[in-house]
Amino acid sequence: MDLLKYSVSYRDLSCALSQNDVDSVNGWLSDNIIQFFGELLEKNFKMTNSTSNIHFLHPIASNYLRIDSKAVLDYFTFAENDWILCPIHDSNDYHPQGSHWSLLVISVDLKISFYLDSRLPTQIMNFISDSGLHPSLKWSQDDSKVYIAVRLSDVENPTLQIGNKSISFRTTGVGASGLGEYSFSLDLFSSVDGERERQMRRAEEMAREQYEEFFKFLTNPLVLYLLVYNIFQWAGFIYVFGILVRGWWVEGDDVKSKAFDLVADRLIILQLAAFLEIAHVLLKWVKGKVLPTIIQASKLIILSMPMLQESRRFSIEMPNIANFAFDFPTFLHVYILLMLPAFFIQMQRMYQQRRRKYMPGLAAKLARRRRALEQTKRQALH
């Protein structure tokens, strides 16, 4: 098509093409080219559709919509228009210097808009041929991924179908048109990579499932018992500690001679209840091993050492029939010394268990790093 002759035949248009405009078509679209065909479309549409009013914004005029000024924006009135065509370039200011143009199609009566871009898929024809309800969408993408946010509330029975080059969605919910069945379908620019596909559930559904799991966890009788048990132990020892601190604050060092009498009844109950931790492990109510739990409960040994040293209880003195002597306080001292490395091993094991539980990503990352280091060492040896 000879664009210059075509332009001359439509001299009633405000835009006329120059030779430079025609020469630039093979490289990019100039403002005049866009304005010429926009006015041509507007004229032909008015000739064939007398009941509808379409308005095509001049590229320069559409650029001024970027200016955040009430005086400028009030100048644009589109109340009498049915359709508005607004060309947009990829520049960040109002000067027409963008390298890529796209088109924003706005329907004033339907209160909807379509963003048409040669680099993005569009579904305007599907919408025109479909009279159903469509939700508000937010679209974003990069070189390898497409992100779609659907704005609906009170969603029920959502259905998402991912085809080779299309995405279809249908659900019942509350959107801009009230309660109803909303749907949309999008044609993708290229095929979906099935091996890298990731399906994410809706945030509301995930939150609801997490709440239900947490509620079931709290209403478990065993969980309630363990919660009450730990609160009882924690509050009891805090109370004992408070009594001792108060006695020391009021009476000073004189309280040492009667400290045990002040808290004896409460402390005996708490220490006896502490031995229930061994029963919890034996009954498998909590995760753990019996021996570490016994070690944790054996802190009473340190407190009982002076009394055992004086009374010689549980010790075997010479002479006797078996000709065997056993000094129980000495055994306890050796046991306490062995507890020092055992305590370090136990704390390290507990730390690793908590890291695997609460930081699985970090544990996997460290495991991959260890495997990479081992592989590097093997390659260096070979």
Image (cartoon, grey):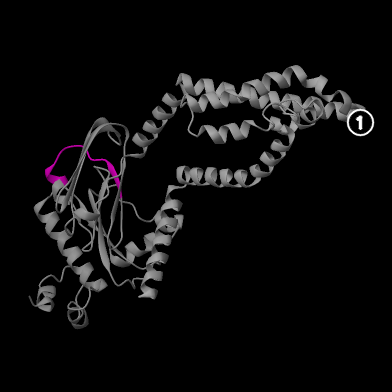
Q: Residue at image x 62%, y 21%?
A: 273
Whether residue 136 appears in magenta in the rendering, the answer is yes
Q: Quadrant of the N terminus?
A: bottom left
Q: Is residue 128 above or below residue 293?
A: below
Which residue does the numbered mark 1 point to in the structure image?
Answer: 252
Q: Residue at image x 73%, y 24%?
A: 239
Residue nearest the viewer, comparing 311 with 174: 311
Residue furthest left as drawn = 1
Is residue 37 visible in this depiction of the protein?
Answer: yes
Q: Residue at image x 10%, y 55%?
A: 47
Whether residue 101 appears in magenta in the rendering, the answer is no
Q: Residue at image x 32%, y 71%?
A: 98
| Secondary structure beneath label 1 | helix
**Residue range of the region highlighted in magenta in the rendering:** 127-138
Residue 286 location (% of width, % of height): 49, 29
Looking at the rendered structure, the kind of residue marked 1 is: Gly
Residue 11 location (% of width, % of height): 15, 71
Q: Write down the quadrant of residue 265 in the picture.
A: top right
Q: Is residue 162 left or right of residue 224?
A: left
Residue nearest the viewer, comparing 121 with 17: 121
Is residue 14 visible in this depiction of the protein?
Answer: no
Q: Write down the quadrant of residue 263 in the picture.
A: top right
Instruction: Say how many tags the image has.
Output: 1
Residue 221 location (% of width, % of height): 47, 18
Few, some or many residues within 10 Å of mark 1 (<14, 14–19, 20+)? few
Q: Write down the quadrant of residue 20 in the picture.
A: bottom left
Residue nearest the viewer, comparing 102 with 40: 102
Residue nearest the viewer, comparing 326 with 323: 323
